[in-house]
Amino acid sequence: MVRATEARVVLVTCGSLPEARKIAKAVVGKRLAACVNVISAPVESVYRWKEKAESAKEILLVIKTTARRLKDLEREIARLHSYEVPEFLVLQVDAGSQSYLGWLTLEVSGS
């Protein structure tokens, strides 16, 4: 039985669709994520940066992984990302279907 508490959803925003696709393919290819949803319709982000209110259109990545892969995933995103401080927000999964959680765990374990 796979425990839902091992699963994580990571949110990352990117400045362009090509960058988002590059990151998604890389992290799935390296088994750092089982699946990445690339929300290709831009989201509008409003934020503070260097003492100024800013806004930008960004592409949202919804990354499915496990707690065990988070450090390597964060390192890979930082390496590939164009932002000085990329968003990397981790959400714990409280519940999910056993078949999906099992698949997710298998895909990032490399077994």
Image (tube, rainbow, N blue to C red):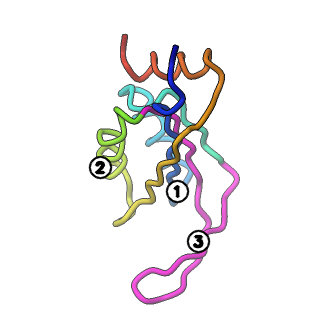
Q: Earlier in the sequence, mark 2 or mark 3?
A: 3
Q: Which residues are magenta?
A: 40-66
Name the element at disc 3. strand
- Label 2: few (<14), some (14–19) or many (≥20) C-alpha neighbours in 10 Å: few
Residue at the spot of label 1: 13
Rendering coords of residue 23 (x, y %): 44, 42
Q: Residues within 10 Å of mark 1 (few under 14, many from 20)?
A: many
Task: Judge by depth and name the residue closer to the eye, 12 or 3.
Answer: 3
Dot 1 falls on a residue whose secondary structure is: strand
- Position in image of residue 33 (x %, y %): 45, 31
Q: Which residue is mark 2?
A: 79
Q: Is residue 44 left or right of residue 29?
A: right
Q: Which residue is mark 3?
A: 56
Q: Nearer the viewer, residue 98 or 53?
A: 98
| Residue 29 screen position, x and y as percent | 40, 26
Residue 86 figure quarter: bottom left
Identity of the residue drawn at 45% across and 59% down: 87
Q: Quadrant of residue 36?
A: top right
- Count of labels shown? 3
Q: CA distance from mark 3 to mark 1?
A: 11 Å
Q: Is residue 98 left or right of residue 11?
A: right
Q: Main secondary structure of the magenta part?
A: strand
Left or right for 53, reference 51: right
> Is 24 within the magenta?
no
Q: Residues within 10 Å of mark 3 (few under 14, many from 20)?
A: few
Q: Quadrant of the C terminus?
A: top left
Question: Of the residues shown, which amino acid type is indicated by label 1?
Answer: Thr
Tell which of 33 and 83 is nearer to you.
33
Q: Are marks 2 and 1 in contact (CB under 8 Å)?
A: no
Horizontally, residue 39 falls left or right of residue 31, namely right
Amino acid type of disc 3? Ala
Name the outermost residue toward the right.
Answer: 41
